[in-house]
Image (cartoon, rainbow, N blue to C red):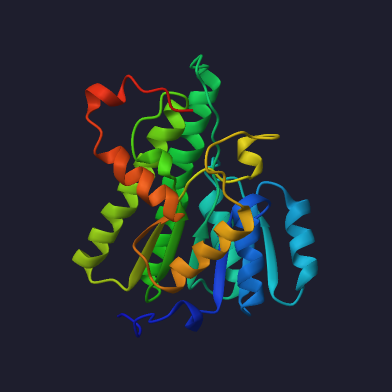
Amino acid sequence: MQNKKHDSFNNMRKAIVIGASSGLGNEVARLLLEQGWTLGVAARRLEPLELLRETAPERVLTQVLDVTSEDAPAALQELIDKVGGMDLLFYAAGIGKQNLELEPSVELGTVTTNGLGFTRMIGAAYRYMAAHGGGHIAAISSIAGTKGLGAAPSYSATKAFQATYLQALEQQTNMRKLNITFTDLRPGFVATPLLGDNPKYPMLLDTRKVAQEMVRAVNRNRHVWVIDWRWRITTALWRRIPRWIWRRLKIK
């Protein structure tokens, strides 16, 4: 039996943030705390999660969780139990690296984290929400999934997979008449540890500003949101480039 539909981001008070130790996940967690949410924060490293907990110890619960591990869904459930429920899952875990030499460890590691890990955790959250009246799943994919980027093949491919997977689950939700909302967040290049030290990327975005726009997008129940306006224009143009031209471009 379904509960009353979740009408608003601000009406939901219990959120789980996976990948909260740094970067966008950490910034989003801090923004949710500012809005008064009770949070469960998860990542592979406990120390940065504890630093986050110290900012609001009565409203932050922590959990060590590695999305590449088969016991990660059990760790997620443990965190949900600590928090007392899950109205919002914000998924920010992921890795990415340029790999022009196609180093096998980079390619396979990226697929394991961004493909298998993503599927494992989004699926666990989906099943929980299906059984508990609904909720909201927001996940960070990337503009890199718009077209195949030669500089980062596995990263680009797994981000396209993530976007398609979320789209498929959104359709399935409607088929099953579940109260689960999805938001696919697609930022351009963001100045986070994912890009390494002193990254020189075009139209580089500020982490805090991107996190703020992500929270607004979830608040407004956006289905897909590209961040920011410059990247919305850029990716719209990318989609229109024929394959015979695209394969000759040098995009890094």
Name above or below for residue 166 compared with residue 98: below
The answer to which of 95 and 228 lies nearer the viewer is 228
Quadrant including the N terminus: bottom left
Examine the rendering and report whether any part of residue 28 can be seen: yes
Left or right of residue 93, residue 45 in this image: right
Q: Residue furthest left?
A: 175
Residue 248 drawn at (x, y percent)? 32, 19
**Residue at 34% across, 62% down:** 223
The answer to which of 193 and 39 lies nearer the viewer is 193
Residue 93 drawn at (x, y percent)? 55, 48
Residue 117 drawn at (x, y percent)? 48, 43
**Residue at 23% across, 59% down:** 171
Name above or below for residue 137 compared with residue 204: below
**Residue at 69% across, 35% down:** 198
The answer to which of 84 and 37 lies nearer the viewer is 37
Examine the rendering and report whether any part of residue 185 can be seen: no
